């Protein structure tokens, strides 16, 4: 019986491979898997369904297809920034993109409409509203790439729900923006850290936002202001009826901004703890205000029509989806972006309302993070650089997602001044007490 089960699993893999490689009569994997599993006892079938996620069976032997291309996972590629980034990376011919999406069928249609070459991408199911789906995705990804380490992880997907008066909760019981934007990406980074450290040039990128930085116009002058408070919501476990990280009354716009604070804090914590020991480049970026993206689908119709015009001609913060994708693709690919712990931005970083730069031909709106301008290392706000709160957020998020992390390497950065020329990076050595500028990991 034991050998029969092993043989059944082996045959299942053979069937999956044949379906993927030869696309026999366009029969989908789910139909074949269910037909095959009918010969196995119900208990065994249940176990296999958990292991192989029959709704989106793992694609295997992907290394044959990937070849020498860099393997890059991008979450949320059905529209907006994620789609534009995937398009730019595929266009180079140097990347094989894993499109990690909730709706596989929709992504298949989007890929077809955008002319994505099948030799440069594949689509895998990832529902960030479910921790189990994140785990299934990682299992499927590893089945696909086999022993080859992942080159790039781009945590891009997000939801923005400013119009909601009451929170929406995921199947795991968390407020949607908290889990989809932060907690599930946090889990994904954890599950892929050990794999990516085997790569000599790995990059882990978490998309940030000016709305989480209160040293910008969008983050410091537009109500509500991002503020994690004492993290009471996370201390209480983060689940329903908790709807805010600070434990306060629900505010849809603030919930989004707070989640982006957590995104950027997570990147900094990963950099401090693991860059030296793993060699992974950890970074974040602000692509500009993509006012036409589906991120604003929760807004009223009049807002969606007028907001792009306002951002383009009044504030100067507007960036097209195409240009935003080029910016994120640069963080993925540009040699300059091998530097870890950086918050990349363009055209002034949105610290002022744009002004007309008449010194340049035809003049361009400058200073608001909008279209044009050179990439530079931006400053984090004091809230995001708060080491005590950042560590607490990291620890509570680890507890909620049920993950454990490797111990930081023999040397760990305990104070970073990546973007401030007046600061120096201080490194603590084993058994060395942190100075006044640093905090220990104990």
Image: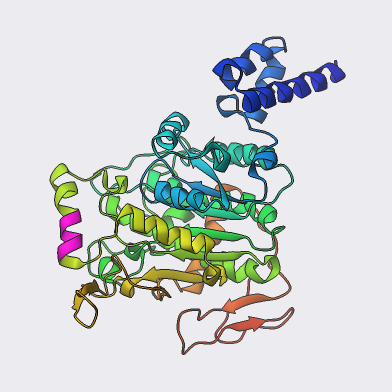
Could you say which is closer to the camera, residue 356 or residue 254? 356
Image side of residue 155 versus residue 318, left or right: right
Residue 126: x %, y % from top left: 51, 38
105 with respect to 80 (left or right): right
The image shows residue 277, relative to residue 424, as above or below, that is above
Q: Was residue 311 drawn as part of the magenta stretch in this picture?
A: yes
**As drawn, 93 above or below 334:** above
**Left of 394 or right of it: where is 62?**
right
Residue 97 is one of the magenta-drawn residues: no
Q: Nearer the viewer, residue 312 or 137?
A: 312
Q: Residue 266 placed where, x, y %?
A: 51, 62
In this view, the residue farthest toward the top is 39
Answer above or below: position of 366 versus 23. below
Q: Which residues are magenta?
A: 308-313
At horizontal 57% and vertical 53% (from top left) the residue drawn is 94
Quadrant of the snapshot with the N terminus? top right
Q: How many marks?
A: 0
Quarter that holds the C terminus: bottom right
Image x and y of residue 138, in percent: 62, 42
Q: Determine the main secondary structure of the stretch shown in magenta.
A: helix
Measuring from the top left, give residue 161's x and y in whole percent: 29, 46
Q: Is residue 59 visible?
A: yes
Occupied quadrant, residue 230 = bottom left
* Most foreground residue, 46 or 359: 359
Extreme-bottom residue of the structure: 422
Q: Is residue 393 visible in this depiction of the protein? A: no
Give the residue displayed 42% in from the left and 75% down from the top.
376
Q: Relative to the observer, which residue lies in front, 223 or 306?
A: 306
Q: Which image quadrant for residue 201? A: bottom right
């Amino acid at each position: 019986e034991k050998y029969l089960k092993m043989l059944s699993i082996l045959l299942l893999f053979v069937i999956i491979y044949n379906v993927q490689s030869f696309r026999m009569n366009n029969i989908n994997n789910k139909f074949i898997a269910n037909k095959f599993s009918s010969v196995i006892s119900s208990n065994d079938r249940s176990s296999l369904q958990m292991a192989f996620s029959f709704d989106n069976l793992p694609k295997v032997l992907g290394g044959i297809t990937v070849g020498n291309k860099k393997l890059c996972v991008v979450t949320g590629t059905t529209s907006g920034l994620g789609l534009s980034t995937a398009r730019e990376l595929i266009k180079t011919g140097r990347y094989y993109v894993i499109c990690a999406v909730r709706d596989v069928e929709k992504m298949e249609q989007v890929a077809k409409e955008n002319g994505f070459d099948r030799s440069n991408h594949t689509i895998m199911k990832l529902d960030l509203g479910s921790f189990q789906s994140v785990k299934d995705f990682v299992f499927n990804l590893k089945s696909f790439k086999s022993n080859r380490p992942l080159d790039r992880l781009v945590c891009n997907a997000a939801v923005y729900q400013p119009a909601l008066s009451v929170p929406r909760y995921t199947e795991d019981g968390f407020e949607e923006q908290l889990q989809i934007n932060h907690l599930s990406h946090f889990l994904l980074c954890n599950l892929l850290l050990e794999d990516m450290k085997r790569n000599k040039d790995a990059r882990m990128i978490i998309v940030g936002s000016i709305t989480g930085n209160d040293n910008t116009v969008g983050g410091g002058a537009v109500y509500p202001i991002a503020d994690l408070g004492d993290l009471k919501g996370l201390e209480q476990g983060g689940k329903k009826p908790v709807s805010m990280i600070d434990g306060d009354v629900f505010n849809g716009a603030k919930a989004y901004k707070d989640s982006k604070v957590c995104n950027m804090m997570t990147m900094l914590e990963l950099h401090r703890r693991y860059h030296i020991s793993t060699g992974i480049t950890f970074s974040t970026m602000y692509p500009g205000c993509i006012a036409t993206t589906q991120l604003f689908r929760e807004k009223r119709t009049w807002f969606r029509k007028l907001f792009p015009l306002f951002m383009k001609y009044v504030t100067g913060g507007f960036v097209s989806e195409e240009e935003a994708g080029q910016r994120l693709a640069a963080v993925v690919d540009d040699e300059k972006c091998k530097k870890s712990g950086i918050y990349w931005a363009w055209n002034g970083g949105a610290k002022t309302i744009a002004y007309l730069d008449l010194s340049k031909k035809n003049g361009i709106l400058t200073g608001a993070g909008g279209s044009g301008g050179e990439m530079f290392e931006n400053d984090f706000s004091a809230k995001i650089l708060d080491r005590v709160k950042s560590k607490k957020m990291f620890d509570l998020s680890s507890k909620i997602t049920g993950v454990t992390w490797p111990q930081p390497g023999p040397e760990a950065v305990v104070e970073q001044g990546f973007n401030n020329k007046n600061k120096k990076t201080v490194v603590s050595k084993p058994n060395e007490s942190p100075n006044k500028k640093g905090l220990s990991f104990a």
